[in-house]
Image (cartoon, grey):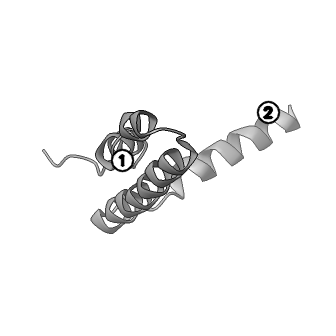
Amino acid sequence: MKLGFAFLLLTGALLFSQKPITPEDVMNCHHACDTKAVASVAACQKAAKTDAQAKACATKEQYASVCYKTCPVPPQKR
């Protein structure tokens, strides 16, 4: 019983203590994705042994677009 109550309090605290998502949070996440994407493309091209392998590396935009899906989305105003 005590464990269930503690879990309920913890869950409530996590749900209600989160700050609202701001446009700056989204921009910071996108910037981090861009940085990771550049590093991923560079690592792929560095590891490539032939020109064909280097050309097959995904572009920065492809890496970044996958990462953007993990970024927070501000709530839509209705």
Q: Is residue 70 visible?
A: yes
**Residue extending furthest left?**
78
Nearer the observer: mark 2 or 1; the answer is 1
Going from N to C along the chain, the mark reached first, 2 or 1, is 2
**Residue extending furthest right?**
2
Q: Secondary structure at mark 2?
A: helix
Residue at 60% in and 46% down:
12
In this view, the residue in front, 27 or 20, is 27
Total marks in image:
2
Residue at 38% in and 33% down:
56
Q: CA distance from mark 2 to mark 1?
A: 41 Å
Residue at 62% in and 52% down:
13
Whole-percent x, y for residue 48 in the image: 52, 41
Q: Relative to 41, say whether 50 is above or below.
A: above
Q: Is residue 20 visible?
A: no
**For this view, does 77 lie left or right of residue 21?**
left
Q: Amino acid at mark 1?
A: Ala
Residue at 37% in and 63% down:
31
Whole-percent x, y for residue 64 in the image: 36, 47
Whole-percent x, y for residue 62 in the image: 33, 40
Instruction: Report which residue position mark 1 lands on.
Output: 64
Instruction: Report which residue position mark 2 lands on.
Output: 4
**For this view, does 67 lie left or right of residue 24?**
right
**For this view, does 9 lie left or right of residue 30?**
right
In this view, the residue in front, 2 or 34, is 34
Q: Amino acid at mark 2?
A: Gly
Mark 1 crowdedness (10 Å alpha carbons): few <14, some 14-19, many ≥20: many
State which quarter of the image contains the N terminus: top right
